[in-house]
Amino acid sequence: MTSTNGGFNALSHGFSHDGNPGRGLCAQVVMKSTVRTAPAPRLYDPPMSVLIVCAHPDLPHSRVNAALFAAARGLPDVTTTDLYGAYPDFFIDVPAEQAALAAHDTIVLQHPLYWYSVPALLKHWIDHVLLQGWAYGPGGTRLQGKRWAHALSTGGQPASYTAEGLHRHTLAEFLTPLHRTATLCSMRWLDPFVTPDADRLAPADIDAAAAAYRAWLQAL
Amino acid sequence: MHHTDYLLQALVYFGAAALFVPIFHKLGLGSVLGYLVAGTAIGPWGARLVSDPAVVAQVSEFGVVLLLFLVGLELNPQRLWSLRRAIFGLGALQVGLTIAAVIALAAVLGQTRSAAIVLGMAAAMSSTAIALQLLAERNLTKTEAGQSAFAVALFQDLSVIPLLLVLASLAPSATAQDGFSLIRLGQAVLVIGAMVLVGRLALRPVLRWIAAIGMREIFIAFALFLIVGSAWLTQAVGLSMALGSFVAGVLLADSEYRMELEVDIDPFKGLLLGLFFIAVGMSIDVGLILSSPLRVAALALAVVAIKLAVLLLLARLFRLSREDSWIFALSISQVGEFAFVLIGPAAASGVLEPRLGALANAVVAVSMLSTPLLFLAFERWVRPHLSPGRKRSADPIDERNPVIVAGVGRFGQIVARTLMGRGCSVTIIDHDPNQVDLLRRFGFRAHYGDASRPDVLEAAGVASTRLLVLAMDDPAAVLATARHVRERYPDVQMVARVHGRLDAIDLVREGVPVVRETFGASLQAAQAALVALGEHPYQARLAVERFRRHDEALLREQAALEADNDARYVALANEGRERLAALLAREQRPGTGGDEGANW
């Protein structure tokens, strides 16, 4: 395992990387990527559009997530939300969020791993937006068939997320509640994009991670 | 005239103003009366310190010229539009009805038709200067009464132009040099048309050019040049100088330099208004008044009574409250400076006999003198009986609700509406009858009453309520009510609106949760400012919340101290600053101030 280019995708311990770069659909349709403030009106549904819901309490000062977020924003058919920036008072605009979810095919939740889970506002967002009768339960079919992925950064070394490592469990095990959430919403779970060791990465490593993130998103 | 005479004159004016105005102000008689008396005292009929009538006339008219420029400057299209009903309804009716009534009176007194019309037109005018000054001194400009008075004065200002045309048509010799001939009228229309045209096309570029130079005094000089120039232009074609400066003001009213002009001319305004009042005082023909005091007084009384009657009638028609009606009517019950503009030429052209003109001028001046006195009488003897407490007894309240909101102005109504939006039944009490009526029109069950009075609170059911929201405007009333309720009804929870920190400390000592009325808004502004400067919205929010908690903790500590221990207050405030500084310093060091651990 190398610490430079190409190493990051493969670091998803416990997951087999779903590397299927042959799709290439995104590259055929060149659309401007948008930073979402309100659900963007769309003339037609572009193939495999991606919604990145990024949850970091201080995105501009984060080391890895800011770089990843900036890299993603340049991509076609990618819409991005800075969740803490949009809802600093935790009052979520549920209809707007649901409209955004409905308008995209792939939902990427980008966040640092906080206490083996998502940051508080992202959990709050899940609680308030993925409602019964809309996302799950009787009549809750609005997310059916869409894909759910995490792009997460961890402070620990990859080896720490093993049965023998510091945390005693794999990332897949820690993400079980989220995996179940996606499944309950009839969504397809994709393997996460993991940036490990995030607090110790050198600038060159961060650039490499951002490039890898772009490639991963384009391949979705 | 030697320049030392000018110096002496200036000395007399400023000396008289500095002597009389403070005395009258201290006596509670208002500055307007002070200036008027100062003018009379130094004028030809007083100490004769200023005895040259030509100077008196010039000084007087320049005061009006500057006043009208400022009035014109206020007359931008939006302002006009928002007041259209008051201006063209109230104003037109006031002018029309007063003219009709005074013409009838003059006819009864045996005046000719032409003279009666001139006197009627003159009497219909009020003094914008006196009215606005009186209202401003009492902080009533923004009330409904003040706005209505301003609207009427504005219509009067506008109606001067048609009234001058009527005056011209009444002149016996239409070709006379000193009258308004048709040719002169044509010239006047041409000149004003040219002023408007040139003003529209050239004024802004020139102003922009001058403003770009960045020398403020040159900008002011140009403004004054404009005022004097337009005054001179209109005077050259036989119109009043005031009309010219008024047009100049209107032309600049919607320019981007209006605010700057207002601010720049404002320092002149007070002094020039004073000068104007002094000039009016000087023009009072004390000799004529003394030779037939009863006649002048009776006529002045009659004219003011007619104006008051018309204004009170209109106030009722336009549904002003009783107190507002009186303030509105009294503030413009005098005959104004435009009357001089009308009477002067009328006397000169023979429409009015010269003696009648002089008498009319004296009546006008006395009516001006009457306004501050009438206002004082009203405030001392009439208003207490009109005050809400007496005018309207507190409404009986038969509801028993878990919440009482006392005071539903800008603050309390938000509280009441939020609670009601959550399905909570709220008893609303307010001591402003207009506010209560307004809320009732929109279906709120509002009750009129002064919540700081124990009997009103008791009637509202404070004994059985769970929560009392004290949202009255008056901090003293809030504190007194809070103390009373804390003592009599210890089980009732309270939330109190306070203005500043000291009020807050008083209430915190009583154990009442307080909300400082501008604190939340200030924090919001701070948050918006941080975001504008590029802070992440959530971090801005955290910073503001940290500050809120810090400040509220400081407030509680201050409240815990004894009230008179000033030294400890200061020490605590300093300590608070240091603590905040430490807090801020910690937040600036990366990696240690974050709330969420490492920043990855």
Image (cartoon, rainbow, N blue to C red):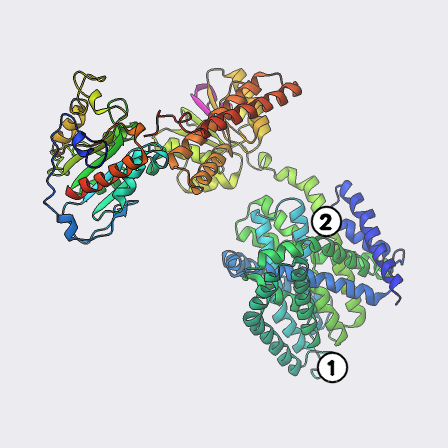
Residue B190: quarter of image? bottom right
Q: Residue sitting at 35 percent across and 25 percent down?
A: B596
Q: Is residue B453 visible?
A: no
Q: Tag 1: residue type?
A: Gln
In the picture, the quarter occupied by the C terminus of chain A is top left
Residue B261 part of the magenta segment: no
Name the residue carrying label 1.
B177
Vertical arrangement, residue A54 with respect to residue B56, above or below: above
Q: Chain of mark 2?
A: B
Q: Tag 2: residue type?
A: Pro
Q: Earlier in the sequence, mark 1 or mark 2?
A: 1
Looking at the rendered structure, the secondary structure element under dot 1 is: loop
Q: Chain of mark 1?
A: B
Q: Position of residue A109 (x, y in %)?
A: 22, 34
Left or right: B23 as drawn, with respect to A156:
right
Q: CA distance from mark 1 to mark 2?
A: 39 Å
Left or right: B361 as drawn, with respect to B539:
right
Left or right: B349 as drawn, with respect to B405:
right
Mark 2 burial class by Cα count in 10 Å: few <14, some 14-19, many 20+: many
What numbered label is drawn on residue B372? 2
Vertical arrangement, residue B571 with respect to residue B525, above or below: above
**In the image shown, does A163 or B355 lie closer to the viewer?**
A163
Residue A10: quarter of image? top left
Residue B461 part of the magenta segment: yes
In the picture, the quarter occupied by the N terminus of chain A is top left
What numbered label is drawn on residue B79? none
Q: Is residue B160 visible?
A: yes
Q: Position of residue B235 (x, y in %)?
A: 70, 73
Magenta range is B458-470
**In the image shown, does B431 or A47 lie closer to the viewer?**
A47
